[in-house]
Image: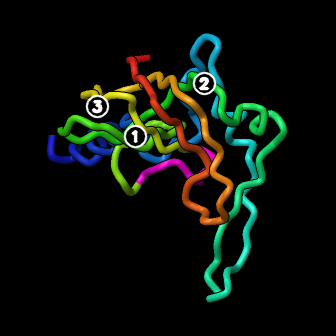
Amino acid sequence: MVKMLPILLAAALAATPALAHDSTTFAPVPKGGVSWETLGATEQLPWVDAAGANRIAPGFTPAVEALDGKLVTIAGYAMLDDEQRGAFTLYASEVDCEFHVSPGPNLRAEVSLAKAQVLKPGALVVRGRLELVRARQGGVFFRIRDAVVTPA
């Protein structure tokens, strides 16, 4: 049995899903909703500020520009804690910790809720007004305001 232990351990590890690093599987698109593929088509345009720091500016596609200020529905994942939340970041892909988040600002959105809610783990559907962040700050390209969240 002792000789079998390394083989059993290797088999168990091989069967463990690697969700933490899978940023290519997006939340399913809700009926009538916006896809992360649409928002993700926003380019990340590099630039350097006066202090020499590297920054990213958004290059919105016409399809994304058309959504600015509109009421949108989108599914995604929030990194949850135990508190009731009035705001959170929505990610295109499942997030299991702060070290494994979506790869860029075109695959996440800041969400401000119309009323604080206790969020449940798993995929969420968010409905609110989309704001395109045009500032050349780099960290946030999308905000969803006055949002309501339901389980996916």
User: In the image shown, does 98 or 108 lie closer to the viewer?
Assistant: 108
- Is residue 128 toward the left or the right of residue 148 in the image? right
Q: Distance between the residues labelled 1 and 2?
A: 40 Å
Indicate the amino acid at tag 2: Val
Look at the picture and state if 17 lies above or below 46. Answer: above
Expressed as whole percent of the image width and height from the top left, the position of residue 103 reads 57, 53
Look at the picture and state if 124 lies above or below 43. Answer: above
Question: What kind of element bears circle 3?
Answer: strand
At horizontal 43% and vertical 52% (from top left) the residue drawn is: 100
Q: Distance between the residues labelled 3 and 1?
A: 40 Å
At horizontal 64% and vertical 71% (from top left) the residue drawn is: 55
Question: Nearer the N terminus, badge 1 or badge 2?
Answer: 1
Bounds of the magenta span? 100-107
| Residue under pointer 1 | 14
Look at the picture and state if 151 lies above or below 18. Answer: above
| Residue under pointer 3 | 116
Image quadrant occupied by the N terminus: top left
At horizontal 18% and vertical 38% (from top left) the residue drawn is: 82
Question: Nearer the N terminus, badge 3 or badge 2?
Answer: 2
Indicate the amino acid at tag 3: Ala
Neighbour tally class for label 3: few under 14, some 14-19, many 20 plus, Cα within 10 Å: some
- Is residue 15 toward the left or the right of residue 62 in the image? left
Res. 83 mark: none
Question: Nearer the N terminus, badge 3 or badge 1?
Answer: 1
- Is residue 17 toward the left or the right of residue 35 in the image? left
Image quadrant occupied by the C terminus: top left
Expressed as whole percent of the image width and height from the top left, the position of residue 125 reads 47, 22
